Image: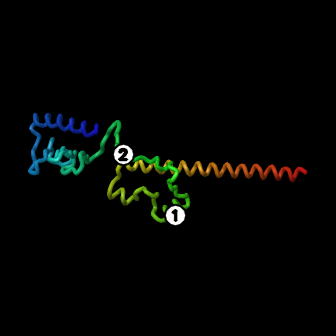
Amino acid sequence: MKIIVLSLLCVVSLSCAAQKQGSVETNRDGSLSLFDGKLEQNTIYVTRDGNMGIGKKKPSDKLEVNGQIHAKSVKVDLKEWADIVFDNDYKLLSLREIERYIEKHNHLPEIPSENEVIKEGINLGEMNRLLLKKVEELTLHLIKKEKQLDALQNDLNQLKQEVHKVTSH
């Protein structure tokens, strides 16, 4: 929401400055072009339905930027988070199941493939949620492996004591 408000403030201030310089143009479709440098990548567009494109003539989202965005912070609102992994009824795939999936699909379960990312891009909020989910799943696997290792170490120590008792008599 902050980004949209700041973007709109930016558009209003740029629009005012552009009007003073005579570089605001109303297009045939009712959209506005600000700072039209005769190149699409040098122009800010505002559509009739309130979408803004920076270097993008027909934006389909509230803000589309054809270029790099630099910000100190970006906030993404999500409807769910990855902590479902810690629910008692969550089905954690075994490492063998994950291995078989990777061998077959060449990527982790639930994570988009390279082709999907290249074709569709990624939603940063959703990708952060998925990556955290994978970190949490790995953490659960490590905890399980540590418990198995501790049990094996205890078994080994008991066997060593028994061997020591038998060999010392």
| Occupied quadrant, residue 115 | bottom left
Front residue of 68 and 47: 47
Relative to 153, 59 lies left or right: left
The residue sitting at the front extreme is: 89
Provide the residue designation for mark 1.
Answer: 100
Q: Nearer the viewer, mark 2 or mark 1?
A: 2
* First in sequence: mark 2 vs mark 1: 2
Looking at the rendered structure, the kind of residue marked 2 is: Leu
* Amino acid type of the residue tagged 1 in the rendering: Arg
- Number of other residues with Cα within 10 Å of mark 1, as a class: few under 14, some 14 to 19, many 20 or more: few
Q: Which residue is painted at 85% across and 50% down in the image?
A: 165
- Residue 78 percent location from the top left of the image: 36, 45
Quadrant of the snapshot with the N terminus: top left
Q: Residue 92: horizontal and vertical position, in percent? A: 52, 55
SS at mark 1 in the image: helix
Q: Position of residue 127 (x, y in %)?
A: 39, 50
Return the residue at label 2: 78
